[in-house]
Image: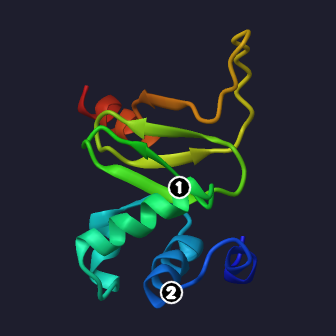
Amino acid sequence: MNLENISKTIKLTSARKAILEILISSKKPLCYEDIKNNLSMDKATFYRNIIKFEEESIISSFESNDKKRYYEIAKTKHSHFICNECSKIECIHEKIDIDLKGYEIDNIIIKGICPKCLNKQENQK
């Protein structure tokens, strides 16, 4: 997704453009704290625009272990892995086949221990 395609959907103000440029260039989901130092806008303006992006299905979001909301450009539906030890978030693009009759699944959050933390645990034994 690029800004040109998004501008066909909503009006791109300077604040919206700034938020979207950061999210488009990121390889991982970001929370407000990850983004705020690169923006010159107040928190209310940030969240007002985030809500608009979600309403227009431009971004998707989820809550992590740290109770923060993470945002990313809505490219393709995929799942996320959140490490219970280090709270690292990874996008999982492998197909996870879960069939719940009568439901449409957009996102699956998988929680566990990442390879790095597992390795640390093994080395401590």
Residue closer to the observer: 13 or 108? 13
The quarter of the picture where the C terminus appears is top left
How far across and how far down the image is residue 66, in percent? 25, 43
Q: Are marks 2 and 1 in contact (CB under 8 Å)?
A: no
How far across and how far down the image is residue 7, in percent? 68, 80
Residue closer to the observer: 71 or 14? 14
Task: Tell me the element at label 2.
Answer: loop
Q: Amino acid at mark 2?
A: Thr
How many residues crowd mark 2 within 10 Å: few (<14), some (14–19), many (20+)?
Answer: few
Give the quadrant of residue 112. top left
Q: Amino acid at mark 1?
A: Glu
The quarter of the picture where the N terminus appears is bottom right
Q: State left or right for residue 115 relative to residue 39.
A: right
Task: Tell me the element at label 1.
Answer: helix
How many residues crowd mark 1 within 10 Å: few (<14), some (14–19), many (20+)?
Answer: some
Residue at the top extreme of this rendering: 101
The residue that mark 2 highlights is: 13
Distance between mark 2 and mark 1 Cα atoms: 16 Å
How far across and how far down the image is residue 81, in percent? 49, 38
- Can you say whether 85 is above or below 30 in the image? above
Give the quadrant of residue 46. bottom left
The residue that mark 1 highlights is: 54
Q: How is the image coloured?
A: rainbow
